[in-house]
Amino acid sequence: MRKANAVLLMVVGGFLSGRAVGADKSLALLPQPLRVERKAGAFALNRDTAIRIDKGFADAASIGKQLAARLRHSTGLNLAVTPWDGETAVHNAIVLSAKNADAALGPEGYTLEATADDVAIAATAGSGLFYGVQTLLQLLPPQVFSPTKAEGSVAWTIPAVRIEDRPRFRWRGLLLDVARHFFHKEEVKNFLDLMAQHKLNTLHVHLTDDQGWRVEIKRYPKLTQLGAWRKDIGFGLDPKQGTAYGADGRYGGFFTQEDVREIVAYAKARYVTVVPEIEMPGHAGAALSVYPEFSCTGGPFDINVDGGVFHGIYCPGNEAALAFLQNVLSEVLELFPSRRICICGDEVPKDNWRKCGKCQARMRAENLKNEDELQSYFVRRIEKYLNAHGRILVGADEILEGGLAPNATVFSWRGMGGGITAANAGHDVIMIPTSHCYFDYYQAKPGEPKAIGGFLPLETVYSFEPIPPSLAADRVPHILGTGGCLWSEYFPNYAHVQYMTYPRACAMAEVTWTDPKLKKWEDFRNRLDTHLQRLRAQGVNYRRPRPTDNAPGNSKP
């Protein structure tokens, strides 16, 4: 799911029931809610304000504590978090409950009603309640996102409103590639914090590739002892830009299993699912550099390579290679409870398979016509293992070639065609075409830091429509959603990750959450001005949009 250096097209695509959010700078909500009604008055936070939590709502306590912590850091107010029985009258309170929740809004939906007397957020599930709190924070001044007490005099008031809201798509994601450049546990946590604020709910983490293996597998310790480290930063980058150096000077790093458990728990508290990706059968150079016996040729394989497509691929004719991968996955499944597990399956050069006696014998034994069908055989074997453990295989649209595995979900990255084919065949799809979703592409020209190629300005991200107009109505539910992809070849540090992510992830958040009838580019840009103040308050290294970003001819950095 990688690197077509295509020149991208720009298309721009509302209406908001109630008062238009963008018309009032104090209501710069992002992503834009389903319905907003502005009323007279405001609710003022003070030292006596309480956060009242529905004592019958299991998730309300943790969400209330997160809200209290955020307000304490930025406002200096230490608001009490106390249980509420659902009946006792409340005053000067923020109420988090299931009372009067609208089931039609679904588990991720919520209502928020603010008056001069109190604020009530209602939802049927913890995720909806959490998203209601994210909207509540955006109703406060941008300084509420500061990690320390805001300087100066700030009026901590919430305008009186009634909001009804729910997401459009189930999969609202970002892909973070930690294989090319490693990002530490605390950086991933910050990435999750920012995702959650934007109501993005899926972190797809790319853990293995030719340049690095980033998750501890206890049965195969050399994967991280050796396969997690390169001699230098690579990719023609300045070594001084890198931050992932070990004590011995090697470049790289990995997550221990305890790190993974901590990250997954942190994400769960923010209603983000972490989906791991273990690349196979291609992009396996890091693993094969230390376990070459699972390849067709026996190596050698070099982890010190820059971007590209290499012959470090697993041998599907070798039962030991398949057993190795199942053993790896057995530990991955213990660490990641996500229903879907990604193997990608993209960019597999099949020359070695054509020359490999074991592969050719496998093809004859299984009556396979060509190497595309051999890849399909490999994917089906892995899928059978995952299905037996209650999981769903996810792969790039290349897994359509040679026949799609029976229960697989497809990432459609080479345009929308693969996704249409998969959906028409009854498979779930995540639409991530390079044209709108590859955040490793340039944002403008000139003056931008080196990137993989291509051109993806903010407006193009915002214009994306994940549901193809040609798709029949009964196939539309198979489009689970979309997300931004951060392939990290040219992201040597986390500050650069933030620069390439924001504000494009703000646009993607609205693509994934907001009813398309309510989307309007000019309104989004107006709201974004205030939203960038929120990012600034948190110290996010976002890219500042420029008036010339979408100028004619500005498409080939």
Image: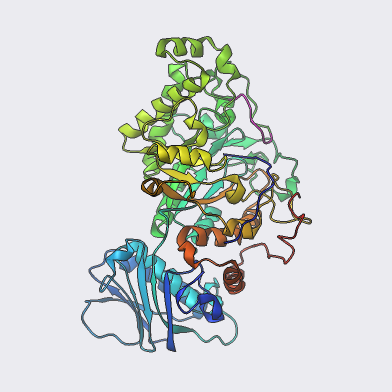
Residue drawn at (37%, 39%), measured in percent from left and top?
426
Residue 485 visible to the viewer: yes
Task: Name above or below for residue 383 compared with residue 196.
Answer: above
Q: Position of residue 73 (x, y in %)?
A: 50, 74
| Snapshot quadrant of residue 45 | bottom left
Image quadrant occupied by the N terminus: top right
Predominant secondary structure, magenta span: loop
Q: Is residue 527 magenta?
A: no
Q: Position of residue 428 (x, y in %)?
A: 40, 42
Q: Position of residue 98 (x, y in %)?
A: 27, 70
Residue drawn at (36%, 65%), measured in percent from left and top?
109
The residue lying toward the viewer, choosing from 25 and 204, is 25
Q: Position of residue 108 (x, y in %)?
A: 36, 61
Residue drawn at (72%, 65%), measured in percent from left and top?
546
How many numbered discs?
A: 0
Task: Name above or below for residue 49 compared with residue 7.
Answer: below
The figure's colour scheme reads: rainbow
Residue drawn at (51%, 45%), measured in percent from left and top?
205
Residue 298 visible to the viewer: no
| Snapshot quadrant of residue 532 | bottom right
The residue lying toward the viewer, choosing from 101 and 535, is 101
* Left or right of residue 239, residue 137 in this image: left
Task: Name above or below for residue 411 compared with residue 49.
Answer: above
* Left or right of residue 173, residue 388 in this image: left
The residue lying toward the viewer, choosing from 493 and 508, is 508
Q: Which residues are the magenta region?
A: 306-312
